[in-house]
Image (cartoon, helix red, strand yellow):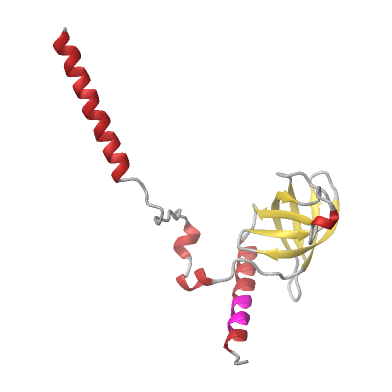
Amino acid sequence: MQMAWFMTMVIFTVAFFLIFLTAYFFRPKKDDRIIPVNPERELMDPEELSLPHRVEPNWPATIETSSGKTAEVSIASITHGSGFIASTMKLPIGEKFQLTIHLPDRPPLQVRAEVTWSNLHLPIEKVVKQGLGIRFIGAGEDAICLINDTLTQHAMAIKAEESIPS
């Protein structure tokens, strides 16, 4: 009986040290970057990775909630998958709505969006620009192309400004 107990303890001790050593020596390092594999990343041109993350187009837009409320707003800044809407319309975090973006020289663009944060609860003197942070949840191919085109044009304008000698 003592031999069985002794062998069980030896096996558990060896197993513990093997698991500990494996976890210690094969853990991710701080410099390791985990980039999820998705179709958009596989199709992305490596030169596009240096694009600015945010541009400020100030496009006029209309919000329409599921309850039927509408408001005229302005898209103050936009990224590949999110944006900031300058507005005083209070929507709860997680609220989904239809966003119609009125673009110059193009037909209006309709996308679904969701409120991710809001600064409308803060005192007005503590806020530079009141509005809502959103993420696009139903952006079609037209919207993605438009956003990417806008970011590309903005990056080219910045490069052109930097190349002009002062």
Q: Is residue 86 above or below residue 69?
A: below
Q: Residue furthest bottom?
A: 165
Q: Is residue 87 above or below residue 96?
A: below
Q: Is residue 124 left or right of residue 110?
A: right
Asked whether 140 or 76 is in front, the reply is 76
Give me the residue at 75% from left, 57% from top.
99
**Residue 112, image x, y percentages:** 70, 53
Would residue 88 be seen by someone viewing this image from the given angle?
Answer: no
Give me the residue at 80% from left, 52% from top.
64
Q: Is residue 158 magenta?
A: yes
Asked whether 121 or 43 is in front, the reply is 121
Would residue 136 be seen by someone viewing this image from the given angle?
Answer: yes
Q: Is residue 34 left or right of residue 156?
A: left
Give me the residue at 16% from left, 18% from top.
7
Q: Is residue 40 above or below residue 161?
A: above
**Residue 83, image x, y percentages:** 68, 60
Q: Is residue 120 magenta?
A: no
What residue range appears in magenta?
A: 153-159
